[in-house]
Amino acid sequence: MAKKRLTPQDRIALDNWNELVASVREHSDINPTDTETEIRQRRERLEKNDEEWFKYYFAMYCTCESAAFHKKATGRLMRNNRWYEVRAWSRELAKSARSMMEISKLALTKKIRNVLLISNSADNAERLLLPFMANFEENQRIIQDYGQQKKPGAWETGEFTCMSGCSFRAIGAGQSPRGTRNKNFRPDFILVDDIDTD
């Protein structure tokens, strides 16, 4: 079977993916000599404090102290099993990064099972889902404390399922989410990001 040649667009996408993955790996160094007890104690301690959890597992995104409004928004989300919130924050105030960290914690701690990410187009939704995928696949701290998350046979751009049991699917505005499920779980977390086209 002949190998398919990459288009220039595919090469750019592959280069961007490789850069993202390298950055995730670089910012998630671990101590390979940590014992099972140390790992369990660290995980239990961090799960009690959202901000510390974010700083440890997502060090590359936590470059400064979170603002009070970030902490309040996270608190509202984490305290409620069902929650609707619009984050009308200005540009560059970490809406996407913050949401990624929150959703990742909920997924890894098995509080959610099926995430639907909706954006203005399917391509944009897939692009926004890539940091989730890169961190679940290559973040050494997540892997050390929660186990390998890349699930063979269920790991594609735009739709994947983690070993923790949570599935992720990206769709564009106007596309039907009909039939979206993870085993018997319908979407229990819907993230709408960059839905406008201005």
Image: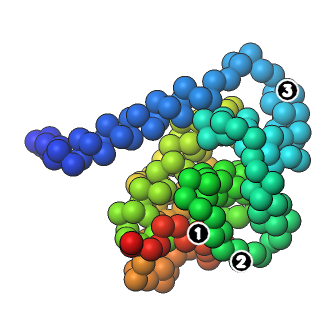
Q: Secondary structure at mark 3?
A: helix
Q: Is 188 on the left or on the right of 38, as rendered?
A: left
**Residue 138: quadrant of the picture:** top right
**Viewer-nearest of discs 2 and 3:** 2
Q: Secondary structure at mark 2?
A: loop
The percent coordinates of residue 120 (x first, y second) are 41, 72
Instruction: Answer with mark 2 or mark 1, whichever residue precedes in sequence.
Output: 2
**Residue 189: quadrant of the picture:** bottom right
Above or below — where is 30 with respect to 188?
above
According to the image, label 3 marks what residue?
38
Q: Nearer the viewer, residue 84 or 72?
A: 72
Residue at 56% x, 53% y is: 92
Q: Residues within 10 Å of mark 2 (few under 14, many from 20)?
A: few
Q: Residues within 10 Å of mark 1 (few under 14, many from 20)?
A: some
Q: Nearer the viewer, residue 186 or 9?
A: 9
Residue type, numbered disc 1: Leu
Residue at 75% x, 47% y is: 66
The percent coordinates of residue 91 (x first, y second) are 55, 59
Instruction: Answer with mark 3 or mark 1, whichever residue precedes in sequence.
Output: 3
Q: Kindly tell me whether residue 27 is visible in this rendering.
A: yes
The percent coordinates of residue 15 (x first, y second) are 32, 37
Residue type, numbered disc 2: Tyr
Extreme-left residue of the structure: 2
- The dot on residue 33 is none
How far is disc 2 from disc 1 in space, using C-alphas?
Answer: 10 Å
According to the image, label 2 marks what residue?
84
According to the image, label 1 marks what residue?
191
Q: Kindly tell me whether residue 162 is visible in this rendering.
A: no
Location of the N terminus by quadrant is top left
